[in-house]
Image: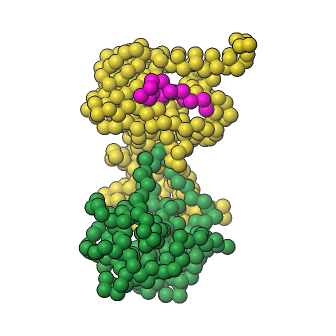
Amino acid sequence: MSVTAPRLMTHPLRVAVFAAEPRRLATLSRWVRDFGHVVVTASENPSVVLTDAVVAATGNLPTVALGTDREGFQARLPSDASPEQIDAALRAVAVGLSVTIAEESGRGFEAVHEDDERTLLTPREVEVLTAVSNGLTNKEIARELGISRHTVKFHIESLMRKLGVSSRAEAVSKSMRLKLLEPYRL
Amino acid sequence: MPNPHSPLVQFSDALSALTAGARGFLAEIRTKDGHRVSGVLWKSDAVVVSEQALPEASEYEVRVADRIVKARLAGRDGGTNVAVLRLESEITATLPPAAIPLAGSLALALGMSANGITARLAILRSVGEAWESLAGGTIDHRITLDSPIGPSEEGGPVLAADGAILGISTRGAGRQSLVIPASTIERVVGVLLEKGSVERGWLGVALRPVALPEALRPDDSQRVGLMVMDVGADSPAAKAGILAGDILLSAGGAPATRFGKIARQLGANSIGKKIQITLARAGAVVTSEATIAARKAG
């Protein structure tokens, strides 16, 4: 059972993605694609720009900038913004809105988060989810963990079922929200 | 006709009397740059405040019991959200006795704001068992209030209906209002005054709970283990031969099903002691022994 939330804008955007590191570029591009947009180069008539740490000057296109103090962008998000936040910001700036992240007034004193036993992942699923959130493809995950691509797919389907999500990007953002990959140090 | 004998008037009078009576121990703490937080005069030379609410400063100005006294930080314990300021000159403390928290009972949460004393009438929304904070402390009861707590009010006293003290108010995650119980504060204050910090045991592992595959379950009832994501260099865990990827099955005889069960074995008196550890590694069960070290502050 999965429920898809209504979207602000349903037609795909043409997004030019910039990041200094190839791995970061790959991750951001994958998130953008996973939300149904098209990743294009700067010369392919993009409708919006997503830039990490301001690696590119972007003319007058609506821009979502990650991890920068510089003014003048339609959206400014922290560098650890979730895929869902980035997607929402891209859609918002594309229709002429500007976006800032809500000021966090301190997180508050918190109990250690003990997970619900029913949705606990297996050790393999934890490894696969970590690799997915690092932006690796199934092929790369298979190579890194020394298992077949078929097995990787099996684990991804299983963890998506446990998390109640229908895409990799959703799995990553939900696991961030539930702090599924955040370790407790003792 | 006003009715001075109405039970509502008696109730109201009782609340305002409790509030007025708190002037002897409800403290206001100010820093030079204009920050203001609330606290409680716990001993004649010590004021307790909420650790997360207290800004860093070399010196604080404490206003309590119609006195203004300079104070310095004696110590912080992020694990229980308690910080203690040591007063430069003593003030006679009039702290009420500790109250026993009961779910559903009334509480008065007091604090300080720019307009003086603030009072919030609350109900003890829930009173749970001992719990572990994300920062590694054990708190004797999980007490939540049904009333919000303002930023400057945090750390003020929470009183029971009879005037006994339940603890200090603390802003929790998701805008929950918590109470750090008086018994927990009492335990921490002495240690902070004496040593400046609360020691905790340290193994040097980063853990994530995982579902145990059937073949690795020590018995049918244990379906969860704690996977070792990372081992600190030169940590007790590293010296015991624990590796990233191992799955902790038990420690000190307790099944490793929840973080709290392991954290509870790493109190101050655990330091230097040996702890038996069983792990699942590459499909087999491995036994090891680690010597618990002291966790570095921060």
Residue B56 seen anywhere in this rendered image of the structure? yes
**Picture quadrant of residue B36:** top left
Q: How many marks?
A: 0
Q: What is the x, y in percent for residue A5?
A: 59, 69
As rendered, which of B40 and A105 lies closer to the eye?
A105
Q: Is residue B82 toward the left or the right of residue B131 in the image?
A: left
Q: Is residue A65 left or right of residue A96?
A: left
Boundaries of the magenta span: B109-122
Q: From what the image shows, is residue B106 above or below residue B130? A: above
Question: Which colour assignment does the render follow?
Answer: by chain
The residue at the point 58 percent across, 18 percent down is B16
Q: Who's the residue at 41% across and 63% down the image?
A: A98
* Image location (x, y in percent) of residue A77: 38, 63
Q: Nearer the viewer, residue A107 or A55?
A: A55
Residue B94, image x, y percentages:
48, 15
Q: Residue at coordinates 51% horizontally, 82% vertically from top-left?
A: A152
Residue at 51% over, 34% down: B169
Can residue B185 be seen in this snapshot? no
Residue B9 inside the magenta-drawn segment: no
Image quadrant in which you'd find residue B38: top left
Towards the viewer: A62 or A173:
A62
Please identify the dominant SS of the magenta region. strand
Q: Colour of chain A?
A: green
For chain B, the rendered hue is yellow
Q: Magenta segment: does it hold B121?
A: yes
Residue B187 locus on image (x, y percent): 47, 31
Q: Nearer the viewer, residue A108 or A18?
A: A18
Query: Which part of the image, by quadrant, shows the N terminus of chain B?
Result: top right
